[in-house]
Image (spheres, coloured by chain):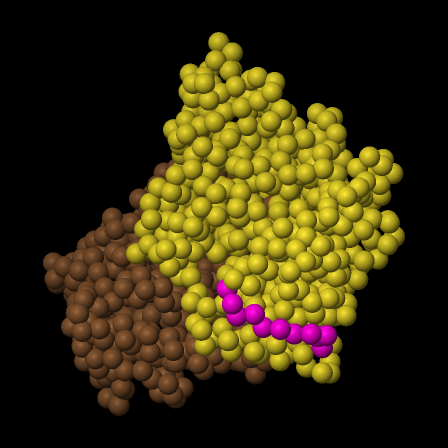
Chain colours: A yellow, B brown
Amino acid sequence: MDIIEKLRDIVGERASAAPAERLCYSSDASQVRGTPDYVVRPLSTAEVSDVVGLAAAEGVAVTARGAGTGLAGGAVPVRGGIVLDLSGMNRIVEMDLANLAVVVEPGVVQARLNETLKPHGFFFPPDPGSAAFCTLGGLIANNGSGMRSVKYGTTRNYVLDLEVVLADGSVVRTGSRTLKAAAGYDLTRLFIGSEGTLGVITQAVLRVAPLPKARRLVIASFNSAEEAGRAVAATFAAGIVPSACEILDRMTVAVLRRCDPSLKLPDGDVLLFEVDGSEGAAAEAAAEIAALCSASSGAAAAASVAVVAGSGEMEEIWAARRLVGAAISRLDPAKSRIYVGEDVGVPIKEIPALIREVAEISDRFGIPAMKYGHIGDGNLHVALFIDVLDEGEWARLAGAADAIHRAAIRLGGTVSSEHGIGAARSGYMMEQVGSGALSVMRAIKKALDPRGIMNPGKLGLDDGPAEVGGSGCSTGADGTPGGTS
Amino acid sequence: MDIIEKLRDIVGERASAAPAERLCYSSDASQVRGTPDYVVRPLSTAEVSDVVGLAAAEGVAVTARGAGTGLAGGAVPVRGGIVLDLSGMNRIVEMDLANLAVVVEPGVVQARLNETLKPHGFFFPPDPGSAAFCTLGGLIANNGSGMRSVKYGTTRNYVLDLEVVLADGSVVRTGSRTLKAAAGYDLTRLFIGSEGTLGVITQAVLRVAPLPKARRLVIASFNSAEEAGRAVAATFAAGIVPSACEILDRMTVAVLRRCDPSLKLPDGDVLLFEVDGSEGAAAEAAAEIAALCSASSGAAAAASVAVVAGSGEMEEIWAARRLVGAAISRLDPAKSRIYVGEDVGVPIKEIPALIREVAEISDRFGIPAMKYGHIGDGNLHVALFIDVLDEGEWARLAGAADAIHRAAIRLGGTVSSEHGIGAARSGYMMEQVGSGALSVMRAIKKALDPRGIMNPGKLGLDDGPAEVGGSGCSTGADGTPGGTS
């Protein structure tokens, strides 16, 4: 009996080896490509367990996938094998709000969870730009976060317990519903951010937080992105913790206003500070930040400052902010944004230096670079765009992305703050974490997945050379050309 | 050349095999006992690295120790070998407040760090009862927390990077100063809470938080501890997150008032809710909690409610709260508190059930039980006390502690919320985490410490039977009788 028949014995018609199906699962939102040999859509932990058990017996690779919104190829099967599409495991299993907990399957979309929680007065804080599409399983596997992590922390702060199918098909639980525990190794946090290389997450108990009663938005405009960066550092130095702290550089602002001319954004390089809490606390914090930004002397002096209190206007600006990634093509219809070098992060006080370096790299390689992102975490999303029909631009793009990654590492930062390493940034792991830490990661990988079947070719864990170029924008393992998402 | 000479080659006179020295390092604040063969007091990472390298070559166990305030025998060398006393590595290496970071050696005492941070307007939130004595290395190795974790989270939320000496003597770094990173396995969180079984922490980069501008304390008294437990659940259900939420049952209140008759604590079972933020926000939140507690109907109705705003009075109450552990002997001079079954935790809504069960267990075994602790995390510190000269009381104590641990597990909780597993609770690990998760922990242990030299006999990781009884109150591996701390 061949493998596809054995897979059909487990999930019936939800297993396929048809070329068209396989092609549909050969990419995510990155440039990484790799075609699976089999596509399986499990609907239960038992099915996942059986499929992984079969894969272990047959020595076939298994790559878990949610919505495919990843920007680093984490869900792309660069070594073939089975893609496990978990988007059908999308039940909110239990609302246990008296324990501040919800139990979810991995295929639940982030925004759906928050819509469900809202009437109860709670929310799940990790809030990536892809919240409307991305699944919680992917968010957990990547330790995703988004704009509110500056106050609320990343996904790892909101997972109490995971159910995981290990590389031998066995099922373990990593925690409990207790808010605080000191009982052995923190397996929950080990699986969070492991990008499917240690096991498949089949259920999660998430901690939720009470929705703040009020929010305010401070919009401050600066004469340069570097100056805005200094204002962020100054805000932190003053001991203020906003619930979001975003930068939109002048090019990003221009693009957003072209998309929506009614949008109330000032000229220049713009910082958006959101604060939350009670009515009084939010108003007070907003006034404090506004005063700090408009101080007439010093590095943090803004060209303009406004405080937005209306939730409608605030929502409009956040909705526009979420569309930056897509809206960028409006700047020049002949150019497309390519997601490489898009997620670097540095320690807060290095933000001005990073902004300066990115501008210099953009000039040097002749690749336009828009800068926006979660600057309160030191996380800068750089949007590089090119004419995809121009071979020379692809080469310069690779050079620019590589230079941006190396600049982040040199500044004591990271090649990825929240999008993950996947296959795209796999080649940077040695330089990023050092040979000692990488050896530890490889030892853990080997201990839990001795045959190397769980999402191979990711995180720099395999001994062989990385499948995709260090810049993260060469073609995939199977030679298909990079797309343009 | 024998081992002591080799150790002296590394650290000179800071290595000893003298019986008196060895005895000094044979206990912590728990009942666990075990005498080391060698005591070494390193002063640098290089020395730790050399000592562990030697231990690896010789196959000798290495147990790291800070201030010895642990309540589970984590720092007790139950299998002999080398105790590494890290209390001499006590430098605050760097104050990098522009990055919200400080760099510390493991022997820095928690309170000293916070005294150093205070003039700069920052603090390190994890705040155990032993803050005045415990070292940061121990806090990290145990994922310690204390009363403010209900809002601020545990130690694991405040570690950006660790320097660790691995079982082969090599030195790795696990993170960076970047606030947010998604770059491979979360080794930082793997070492946090690993209780020295995977390596020795020799330096840490900690994230600090801005000191809140104001605090308020709501003191609410209830007719039963169970009723107080219901009020906690109701507070969370209302979406309020206090910065601390402590319970002192009526017996604890009586003890504290006997220690300090001027202490402004009401009769009954008392909840202390602390809230923090700006002046306005703190006042508003305090009023809200007070209103909720004094609601005339429903489960949460308090007998009395008061709001304390003065920092002097607040400090007095918190100082008294910190002394509970020690003060308890005032209740009956013939009895001593024994730290067993002292750190259970359950999901929030099970708090009333846990309180009920502990009271029933106390009655059944005839062992008085005071209940206090971080009830906002579901963490109840049970104080059991006995006449240590009475053999029968020891046996009943063991039975009571075991029943408390089992009740916590049965209620979906944990045998330790923050004190750790160590040797004292090692026997519960299988029941606590399940055989699957324990196998994963053992595989990780084996991968990173194949010879099993790092703090053996802890966390239920060794294949042999646990050295100390499941109740956590039998004698140590070397047969010395349990003490009374």
Q: Residue at x 39, y 39 (%)?
A: A91
Q: Quadrant of residue A422?
A: top right
Q: Quadrant of residue A476?
A: top right
Q: In screen coordinates, is B24 left or right of A447?
A: left
User: Any magenta on residue B341?
Assistant: no
Residue B102 visible somewhere in the drawing: no
Image quadrant for the C terminus of chain B?
bottom left
Q: In screen coordinates, is B186 left or right of A328?
A: left
Extreme-front residue of the structure: A262
- The residue stretch that appears in magenta: A301-311
Q: Position of residue B479 (x, y in %)?
A: 32, 56
Q: Residue at x 46, y 38 (%)?
A: A107
In the rendered view, would you say B475 is above or below A37? below
Q: Quadrant of residue B3?
A: bottom right
Q: Position of residue B272 (x, y in %)?
A: 31, 75
Q: Residue at x 73, y 46 (%)?
A: A329
In the rendered view, would you say B130 is above or below A93? below
Give whichever of B73, A455 is nearer the camera. A455
In the rendered view, would you say B6 is above or below A276? above
